[in-house]
Amino acid sequence: MLNIKNISKSYESQLILDNISFEIGKGETAAIIGPSGSGKTTLLNLIGLLDKPDNGNVFFNNEDVALLSENGKSIFRNKHIGYIFQMHYLLPQCTVFENILIPTLSYKHKADKLAAIERAEYMLEKSNMIQHRNKLPGQLSGGECQRTAFVRALINQPDLILADEPTGSLDEENASILSTELIQLNQEFNTTLIVVTHSNQLASKMNKIWHLKNHKLIGE
């Protein structure tokens, strides 16, 4: 599904990533680990079309999506990619349910909107969050906010989830619980998952572990 070929990236002549290549298939999971400042988030941004490589290709189902226009990339991201960050970035004035449905605001057909509402209710049930659907983020714990962010990332049924330290702001117990829930939801929806993490516990749950060091990506 996703094939990264020979991508490199520098900022102000400082090399960050050097000739990175890897493949990951539909429904597979992978962790990218490495020291702080090694370029993990930069690599995730290149995969997610939030930044452009200096050279190389980002093939998604055999299409080099790095060559899309900025508008084309935006449309592609909304349709095919879900993002989870260390901070949940929930809108404080919106309820849990409203936050989850934000990625679906571009839907034009009533049937699609109704299907999204059904998915949201189902995923809230699966993640033990249905009782919080009408609460504001300020009324939730950190773990509950991150659960909401997980569901929001999956609401459009993306092909790929990119998660940047998704449990980094949580204590060990909540991090373990949420990482298990994320993987369970990911498996149920057959979504490809790539996680940047410092957590060996989270990385060990992935199908693949890649180490980013000295500008290179090394697989296990």
Image (cartoon, rainbow, N blue to C red):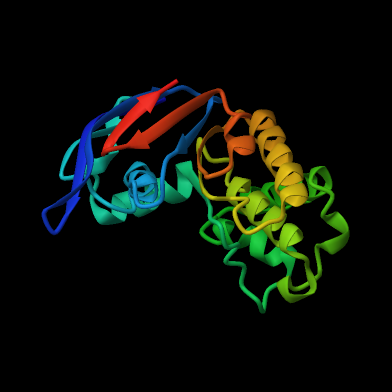
Q: Residue at x 35, y 26 (%)?
A: 218
The image position of residue 163, as x and y in percent, is 52, 46
| Quarter placement of the C terminus | top left
Q: Residue furthest bottom?
A: 93
The image position of residue 83, as x and y in percent, is 51, 50
Q: Residue furthest right?
A: 131
Q: Of 120 and 194, which appears nearest the observer? A: 194
Residue 169 seen by the camera: yes
Query: Tag count in the figure?
Result: 0
- Is residue 128 left or right of 72 when viewed as pictured? right
The image position of residue 183, as x and y in percent, is 67, 34
Q: Of 113 and 9, which appears nearest the observer? A: 9
Above or below 2: residue 195 = below
Q: Residue furthest left?
A: 13
Q: Of 147 and 134, which appears nearest the observer? A: 147
Q: Of 116 and 193, which appears nearest the observer? A: 193
In which quarter of the view is residue 3 placed? top left
Above or below 109: residue 193 = above
Q: Residue at x 41, y 25 (%)?
A: 1
Q: Residue at x 57, y 32 (%)?
A: 191
The image position of residue 209, as x and y in percent, is 49, 27
Residue 61 seen by the camera: no
Q: Residue at x 65, y 76 (%)?
A: 92
Above or below 178: residue 145 = below
